[in-house]
Image (cartoon, rainbow, N blue to C red):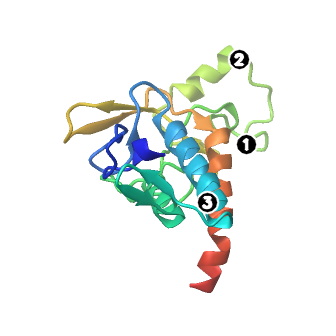
Amino acid sequence: MCTLIPESSSYHIEFTPGGLIYRPGGSNLQHATTISFLLLVYANYLEKSSQTVNCGEVSISPSMLRQIAQRQVNYILGENPKGMSYMVGYSNLYPQRIHHRGSSLPSTKDHPQVIGCKEGSIYFNSSDPNPNVLVGAIVVGRVKMMSMRMIELIFGSLNPQLISMHHLLVFLHSLWPILILS
């Protein structure tokens, strides 16, 4: 946990200028949702056992861990430099072309004939938005850190991640009592 806390002497996790946890390689949003999920689980454990984490001279409370997780979720839902939600169907600006057969092919109502694997390429290669919105899917893409001030999200093929969505839903569910009481 201490590696995530900038004030800690063992801090070494990178964040993008917009605040997303950065890990070189692919599927960056999957890492951010997984870390957020683990932070939340650990924060709940610390709270129930009335403990904190000591990171050198810094004491980390459960609320501090929740704040880090909350920033990741907010980033995914649109509080980022692009103002774009990476959850499909959430807000007015979200990915319109994701790599998912059920989302990119026309519905059987609109196209009752069978579409074979190779016949689907015309839909996959189209620049039009997907005909079916896969509401709730979180696209992962890859994050390329160009410099400490520049970040680029690369979506060669926007693949939805159900694992990421599960972690996000668990996080939001845990906030439900807080949201109702506020």
Question: Tag 1: Cα neighbours inside 10 Å, few (<14), some, or many (≥20)?
Answer: few
Q: Is residue 136 visible?
A: no
Q: Nearer the viewer, mark 2 or mark 1?
A: 2
Cα–Cα gap, marks 2 and 1:
18 Å
> Which residue carries the number 3 mark?
46
Is residue 76 shown left or right of residue 131? left
Query: In terms of depth relative to the viewer, which is nearer, 10 or 142?
Result: 10
What residue sits 49% from the left and 58% below the top? 65
| Secondary structure type for disc 2 | loop
Mark 1 highlights which residue? 110
Q: Residue at x 56, y 27 (%)?
A: 124
Callout 2 touching callout 1 (CB < 8 Å): no
Q: Of the residues tagged 2 and 3, which is closer to the observer?
A: 3
Q: Quadrant of residue 116?
A: top right
Residue at the spot of label 2? 117
Say which label, 1 or 3, has the lower sequence index: 3
Question: Where 179 sits versus 56, above or below?
Answer: below
Q: Disc 2, disc 3: CB below 8 Å?
A: no
Pick the front one: 118 or 65: 65
Image point (41%, 41%), residue name? 3
Q: Amino acid at mark 2?
A: Cys
Q: In the picture provided, is 5 more to the left or to the right than 34?
A: left
Residue 70 point in image, percent of width and height: 49, 60
Secondary structure at numbered mark 1: loop
Q: Residues within 10 Å of mark 2 (few under 14, many from 20)?
A: few
> Which mark is first along the chain, 3 or 2?
3
- Residue lying at the far top of the rendered structure: 118
Whole-percent x, y for residue 178 in the image: 61, 76
Q: Secondary structure at mark 3?
A: helix
Q: Residue flagged by tag 1: what amino acid is it? A: Asp
Q: Quadrant of the C terminus?
A: bottom right
